[in-house]
Amino acid sequence: MKTKVREMRTKLKMTQQQLADLVHVSSRTIISIEKEQYSPSLMLAYRMAEVFGISVEELCCLKENLELEGKQHEDL
């Protein structure tokens, strides 16, 4: 799942550790999310969205992800 975590974090001039502290996870978790190696739980996505002042839908690029899924199904 593509997310805007890195984009929003750097926009706020926040380190990975600072974000991790604010949402109560390890910096490794933030790194993994940013590298798209791990999808955040709904609760973690909510906490990050709250920190960034955006919706979970926007943070998780839900519109873009749905469009990508639709295209993949068309290719089958």
Image: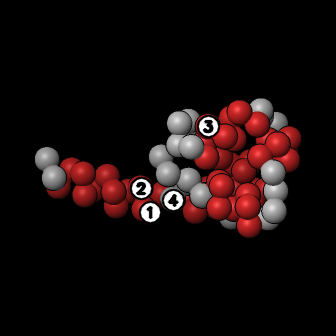
Marks 1 and 3, the one that precedes in the sequence: 3
The numbered mark at residue 63 is: 1
User: Could you say which is closer to the camera, residue 31 or residue 58?
Assistant: 31
Q: CA distance from mark 1 to mark 4?
A: 6 Å
- Residue 49 against residue 31 in the figure, above or below: below
Q: Mark 1 and mark 3 in contact? Answer it, CB < 8 Å.
A: no
- Provide the residue designation for mark 3: 32
Q: CA distance from mark 3 to mark 4?
A: 17 Å
- Give the SS element for disc 3: helix
Percent from the top left, x then y, of residue 70? 27, 56
Q: Who's the residue at 73% across and 58% down the image? A: 9
- Give the SS element for disc 2: helix
Q: Mark 1 and mark 4 in contact? Answer it, CB < 8 Å.
A: yes
Q: Tell me the amino acid under the disc marked 4.
A: Cys
Marks 3 and 2, the one that precedes in the sequence: 3
- Provide the residue designation for mark 4: 61
Residue 59 in which image quadrant: bottom right
Q: Mark 3 and mark 4 in contact? Answer it, CB < 8 Å.
A: no
Q: Who's the residue at 34% across and 61% down the image? A: 67
Percent from the top left, x then y, of residue 64? 42, 62
- Give the SS element for disc 1: helix
Q: Mark 4 and mark 2 in contact? Answer it, CB < 8 Å.
A: yes
Q: Tell me the amino acid under the disc marked 2.
A: Asn
Other-residue count near label 2 (Cα within 10 Å), few / some / many at <14 / 14–19 / ≥20: some
- Provide the residue designation for mark 2: 65
Q: Mark 1 and mark 2 in contact? Answer it, CB < 8 Å.
A: yes
